[in-house]
Amino acid sequence: MSDHDGQIAQQIPRLRRYARALTGDRSAADDLVQDTLERALSRFHLWRQGSDLRAWLFTIMHNIYVNQARSRMRHPHEALDDPAADALHAREPDWAELRDIDDALSRLPGEQRAVLLLVGLEQFTYEEAARVLDIPLGTVMSRLSRGRERLRLILAGDPRATALKVVK
């Protein structure tokens, strides 16, 4: 294993955690991580030595995720439900709070969810999150603020959480 393979391999747990939180599905998360690793390894020559490898990998993952989401919007398909998996999770009361948080995160707009996950879960700085998402620092801060507030409302069961303001 080369040195850069080892550096990338160290980031796999973080990539898996972020992918799982983004997609909400273990299988889709594994696919997203695999696509990210394949792209990173095939384009490792584009990484600037001395820059933040973690941020570079998360940027790749975010871009793949956005591209896949756009593709799904253009070419929707019907997902197959797995009732056995639902029954298994229903018997695990210890996980109820985590499922509520996961559900609340999935109800956030994608832009807010991505910022919240990078800053809150992956502990990126605001500047790092701005670089990963390729948005201004102020946009990171406003999306994070709105995302946190909306998450609080959703978890509290507040009906205002579902009302989105249309901004033109």
Image: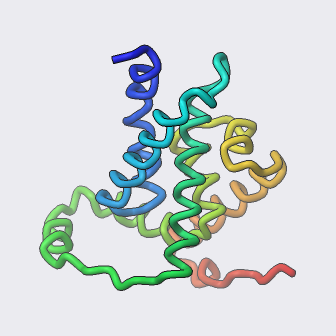
In the image: residue 136, left or right of residue 68: right
Which image quarter holds the N terminus? top left
Pick the front one: 147 or 13: 13
* On screen, residue 10 above or below 95: above
Pick the front one: 72 or 29: 72
Q: Residue at x 42, y 49 (%)?
A: 35
Residue 165 visible? The answer is yes
* On screen, residue 71 above or below 114: below
* Figure label count: 0
Which image quarter holds the C terminus? bottom right
In the image: residue 78, left or right of residue 52: left
| Image quadrant in which you'd find residue 23 | bottom left
Q: Residue at x 44, y 51 (%)?
A: 19
Residue 156 visible? The answer is no
In the image: residue 33, left or right of residue 139: left
Q: Position of residue 22 (x, y in %)?
A: 48, 58
Q: Residue at x 63, y 26 (%)?
A: 52
Q: Position of residue 70 (x, y in %)?
A: 58, 71
In this view, the residue farthest toward the right is 168
* On screen, residue 137 above or below 55: below
Q: Residue at x 57, y 78 (%)?
A: 158
Q: Position of residue 43 (x, y in %)?
A: 54, 35
In the image: residue 120, left or right of residue 12: right
Q: Position of residue 152 (x, y in %)?
A: 58, 64
The scheme the figure's colours follow is: rainbow
